[in-house]
Image (cartoon, rainbow, N blue to C red):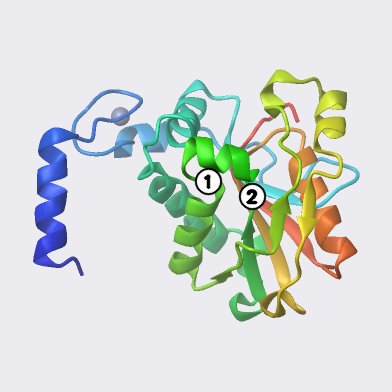
């Protein structure tokens, strides 16, 4: 329950920064309910289409302009409350789909895909970490943010071809194993996956340090991946 101070802060913020739906401009929420209902599901969200690599589950299709706009607003425009919208969509999806809802919550751990320290300083927040923490508290699953380090300040994947993306992400991560990871099912969390190269490289780093059961869960994924 929100305290009076929190309610007052929200009311003041609402006057200066009113929440307007990113898709239709209506007042009240960053993504209004009718627009949220229209967001297209990822056509292969339940099973990964990749022959190699970790299974990657996704809620929405990244081929939708509306989904891209929402992701962009969280990542680059600082609308951090969109992490709540995304994590709620992800926790609903988790509870509904047997690829995830059969996992024992106490034996699972969420690891957000880290940003390189330089990029984190420039941007000021890591959208994957915001999503992972909200998702973790909604589901009751622990989050381990310090287990993966991004050692390579990679180019944005969106500007590269499929082959270049794989090369760009090669050896981009280092795993610093923690006691809380031991024997756990690791779920890598990110806002978006396209080819899956980022998730697969992060999984390789975890495997080198003993991680075995690793999968990815993202808010949006391209249908053409
Ligand atoms: Zn709307």
Residue on which the image places disc 1: 126
Q: Nearer the viewer, residue 5 or 18?
A: 5
User: How many tags in the picture?
Assistant: 2
Q: Is residue 39 visible?
A: no
Q: Quadrant of the N terminus?
A: bottom left
| Residue labelled 2 has its Cβ within 8 Å of some atom of ligand 1 | no
Residue 65, position as x, y percentages in the image: 50, 21
Q: Earlier in the sequence, mark 2 or mark 1?
A: 2
Residue 160, position as x, y percentages in the image: 76, 20
| Quadrant of the picture in which ligand 1 is shown | top left
Residue shown at 52%/41% (left/top)? 121
Q: Any mark on residue 114, and which? A: 2
Q: Circle 1: is it few (<14), some (14-19), or many (20+) Cα within 10 Å?
A: many
Q: Nearer the viewer, residue 224 or 106?
A: 106
Residue 169, position as x, y percentages in the image: 80, 37
Along the horizontal axis of the image, is 216 left or right of 75?
Answer: right
Whether residue 45 is situated above or below residue 142 in the rendered picture: above
Q: Circle 2: is it few (<14), some (14-19), or many (20+) Cα within 10 Å?
A: many
- Is the residue under label 1 in contact with that under label 2 (CB below 8 Å)? yes
Residue shown at 68%/23% (left/top)? 158
Q: Nearer the viewer, residue 197 or 90?
A: 197
Residue shown at 80%/55% (left/top)? 203
């Amino acid at each position: 329950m929100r305290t009076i101070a929190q309610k007052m802060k929200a009311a003041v913020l609402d006057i200066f920064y009113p929440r307007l739906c990113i898709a239709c401009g209506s007042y009240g929420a960053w993504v209004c309910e009718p627009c949220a209902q229209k967001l297209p599901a990822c056509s292969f969200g339940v099973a990964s289409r990749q022959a190699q690599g970790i299974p990657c589950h996704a809620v929405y299709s990244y081929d939708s302009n509306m989904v891209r706009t929402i992701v962009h607003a969280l990542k680059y425009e600082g609308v951090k409350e969109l992490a709540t919208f995304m994590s709620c969509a992800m926790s609903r999806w988790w509870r509904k789909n047997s690829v995830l809802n059969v996992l024992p919550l106490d034996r699972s751990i969420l690891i957000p895909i880290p940003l390189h320290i330089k990029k984190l300083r420039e941007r000021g927040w890591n959208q994957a970490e915001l999503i992972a923490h909200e998702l973790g508290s909604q589901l009751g699953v622990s989050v381990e943010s310090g287990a993966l380090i991004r050692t390579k300040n990679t180019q944005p994947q969106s500007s590269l071809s499929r082959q270049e993306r794989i090369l760009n992400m090669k050896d981009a991560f280092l795993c610093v194993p923690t006691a809380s990871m031991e024997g756990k099912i690791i779920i890598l969390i990110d806002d978006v996956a396209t080819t899956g190269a980022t998730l697969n490289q992060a999984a390789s780093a975890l495997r080198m340090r003993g991680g075995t059961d690793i999968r990815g869960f993202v808010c949006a994924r391209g249908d053409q991946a």
